Amino acid sequence: MNQEQISGIAHTAHPIKSPLDDDSVRTLLGHGVARGGARVLDLGCGTGEWLLRALAAHPEVRAEGVDISKDSLAQARAEADARGVGDRLELHHTPAAEFSAPHGFDLVLCVGSTHAFGGLLPTLAAAREYLAPGGRVLVGDGFWQSEPTPDAVDMLGEFADLAGTLDLVAADGWIPVHGHVSSRQELDDYEWSLWGSLASWALDHPDHPDSAEALATAAARRTEWLGTYRDSWGFVSLVLRSTRG
């Protein structure tokens, strides 16, 4: 069972692949889509849930998603058609670094996928390349809420604290116009949902050749969360405008 398969099962009940509840997603998109007829781009869109919600909430929006997973894009297309927004969604099977478009975008999204670009600042640099004048970026990334253990850093990587994260963003030429720090409930709900969904799948498919692996993975990930990073790791989502035009 590869990581994409594990993630797909784990996110069954939480298609927004970040620790955000529905109200937070709705509010963030409301601040991100600032004009009628906006063009929205998601870099690393996966199954397209952010785009699907933006299209449903804003009938004049047109959206494009970029991802390297054919299976995720196929799921996004099927779900867009089922929700009646497929005519306003264009999907691209290509690495984000190789994507090009004849126009800019009013909102560029990358929430929970900054690792694909090597971190927060490289993600913002990539987003800036696609941004129309006056456009906005909606980015979500981790930060340390308290001093992490060495094991937490080894597991999740290097992050700043919240103030340091905002300092980095400002120094890179961005101004936050809205932000959301995921609550303890959002963070916990996300982890319980992930590993509960994976464990439930394993228990519901006891004869599947991957069942034992899925159950063991769910137990291991839950233990890592509770014992290694639950008390130190947080998640912040920012709506940003560039000071560089």
Image: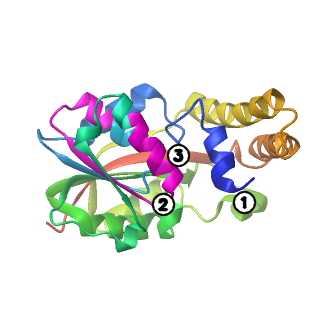
Which residue lies under the disc numbered 2?
Answer: 114
Q: Amino acid at mark 2?
A: Thr
> Is residue 65 within the magenta segment?
yes
Q: Nearer the viewer, residue 131 or 81?
A: 81
Count of number-bearing discs: 3
Query: Residue shown at 15%/36% (left/top)?
Result: 60
> Is residue 168 within the magenta segment?
no
User: Where does the image place residue 242, in percent across and percent down from the top left?
Assistant: 22, 61
Which residue lies under the disc numbered 1?
Answer: 155
Q: Is residue 70 left or right of residue 211?
A: left
User: Where does the image place residue 91, in percent across and percent down from the top left?
Assistant: 34, 53
Q: Which residues are magenta?
A: 53-79
Query: Residue shown at 40%/26% (left/top)?
Result: 23
Q: Amino acid at mark 3?
A: Phe
Where on the picture, by quarter, is residue 27?
top left
User: Where does the image place residue 213, in percent across and percent down from the top left?
Assistant: 85, 47
Q: CB under 8 Å between callouts 3 and 1?
A: no
Q: Residues within 10 Å of mark 3 (few under 14, many from 20)?
A: many
Residue 46 in view here: no
Q: CB under 8 Å between callouts 2 and 1?
A: no
Q: Earlier in the sequence, mark 2 or mark 3?
A: 2
Q: Residues within 10 Å of mark 1 (few under 14, many from 20)?
A: few
Q: Which mark is residue 235?
A: 3
Q: Secondary structure at mark 1?
A: helix
